[in-house]
Amino acid sequence: MRRLLFAANWKMHLGPEEARAYFKTFRARYNRRDDREVWFFPPAVSLEAAAQAARERADLLVGAQDISWEPKGAFTGAVSAPLVQQAGAKATLVGHSERRHVFGETDDDTRRKVAAALAAGLLPVLCVGETLAERDAGHTTAVVTRQLSGALSELDGGALSRIVIAYEPVWAIGTGKNATPQDAAMVHREVRAWLQARSAARPRVLYGGSVNLKNAAELLAEPELDGVLVGGASLDPETWAQLVQTGAA
Ligand code: PGA
């Protein structure tokens, strides 16, 4: 059975108090289903509140939006994998498009962050995706492959099997323009092939970029999608509770 993964990226929204209220509503609206799991990526200050609110529900998991590649030390403003773990995180996003394009994160940074996550026992969700100019120039495959090998080429099949990939075309994030299920599936197949060629067992590939209540069913009907990574449409617990019921595993 395919187990769908619904991941909520709250970005710079929802502080600890709001996170507690969110989970109260969400837990009341969404009961555990064996055919799906739901992951939440709150801002670092809300990790502990979210992790507390999600405990006792094995289908819910909380992760960080970003980590430092260093485990500790004099790095003002940074948060390490062991620190987010203490707050209850079990996973972390790495290389989200906003980290790459707003904060200048490089492929080599993502390599170090994936390694730091794995060393601490966090599940990395590596985000990859091309810009509109790269897509128009026909470079989608080249960009995604470069991002995969930049972050993952030093890892063996065992480590690769612990990594989730989120394909998020940059032009689709927060724009209201989602990739078609066919477009996404084409990239997902390439990502899966890349991982399988390096002995990753059953790689999971999510799609992200303007997923909402209206388009989720059509996207998830495409068997190449193992789930979705959602920003804007995950911020309201009622909408999100509805969205995570979408699609048959
Ligand atoms: P969006 O964001 O759903 O608001 O497009 C997705 C993401 O950035 O992960």
Image: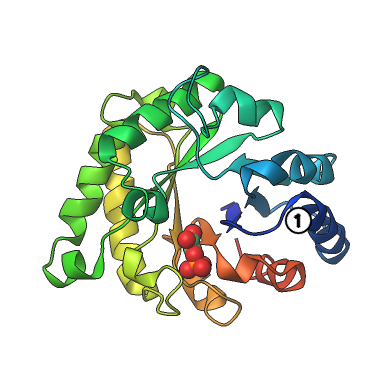
Percent x, y of residue 138: 12, 66
Q: Amino acid at mark 1?
A: Arg
The front one of 164 and 185 is 164
* 171 relative position to 52: left or right: left
Q: Is residue 4 above or below residue 241?
A: above
Furthest residue in direction left, as rendered: 137
The residue sitting at 29% across, 59% down in the picture is 187
Q: 247 and 60: which one is in front?
A: 60
Quarter of the rendering occupied by the C terminus:
bottom right
Horizontal arrangement in the rendering, residue 11 relative to residue 26 (left or right): left
Work out whether 117 lies above or below 175. Answer: above
In this rendering, the answer to whether 74 lies above or below 24 is above
Q: Provide the residue designation for mark 1.
A: 33
List the single residue furthest toward the bottom: 214
Residue 18's spot in the image, x, y percent?
Answer: 79, 58
Which one is nearer the viewer's eye here, 35 or 166? Answer: 166
Rate crowding at label 1 as few (under 14), some (14 to 19) or many (20 or more) other CA atoms within 10 Å: few
**Can you tell which quarter of the image residue 70 is in?**
top left
- On the question of residue 37 being in view, the answer is yes
Image point 45% across, 79% down: which residue? Answer: 176
